[in-house]
Image (tube, grey):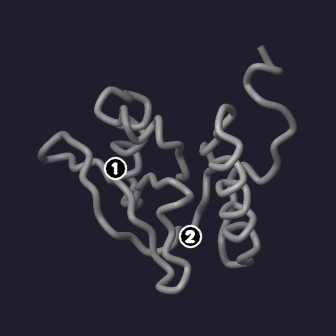
Amino acid sequence: MTVSDNTVGRLAEDGELRRTAELAAEKGVLFYVFTPDAIDWEKGRVAGYTYNLRNRRWEEKLFPAPQVLYDMATYPDDPEKRRIAREANRLLRDDWRRQVVNHRRYFGKWQTY
């Protein structure tokens, strides 16, 4: 799951992501979050965070490029980071072997509200 820098900064307090990680573990799914700028395109891996159920905390590790992508990395207040995120997500989505969960963005949460 791609997330923003702000989300990474508050992983310890984010109960929703923790619960998602716990549910994924119950199903035997490797769940991790990463920012779009943490992708090593040449090596096909990302630096991200996974929730350690034993220690009850998030740990930073290297992971393979994701097989399934859920994009939550938005940067409404930072045009440069938004550009990097869009380009990274375009490249991730272009790989036909990758399943993209939210493949289209029609409008943002504030437009929905």
Q: Tags 1 and 2 in contact by the CB under 8 Å rule?
A: no
Of 99 and 71, nearer the camera is: 71
The image position of residue 47, as x and y in percent, is 39, 64
Q: Residue furthest top?
A: 113
The dot on residue 3 is: none
Residue at position x 51%, y 68% from top? 39
Q: Which residue lies furthest to the left in this view?
A: 55
Task: Read off the residue under disc 1.
Answer: 26
Residue at position x 71%, y 71% from top? 91
The image position of residue 52, as x and y in percent, is 22, 50
The image quarter containing residue 48 is: bottom left
Q: Which residue lies furthest to the right in this view?
A: 106
The image position of residue 78, as x and y in percent, is 65, 39
Picture layout, residue 80 above or below residue 84: above
User: Mark 2 is on which residue type?
Assistant: Gln
Left or right of 87 on screen, residue 31: left
Q: How crowded is mark 2: few (under 14 residues within 10 Å), some or many (20 or more)?
A: few
User: Mark 1 is on which residue type?
Assistant: Glu
Picture layout, residue 4 above or below residue 10: below
Gap between marks 1 and 2, in whole Å? 18 Å
Left or right of 2 on screen, residue 48: left
Q: Is mark 2 on a helix, strand or loop?
A: loop
The image position of residue 62, as x and y in percent, is 34, 69
Q: What element carries label 1?
A: helix
Residue at position x 26%, y 46% from top? 58
Number of marks in the rendered image: 2
Task: Read off the residue under disc 2.
Answer: 67
Name the quadrant of the C terminus.
Answer: top right
The image quarter containing residue 12 is: top left
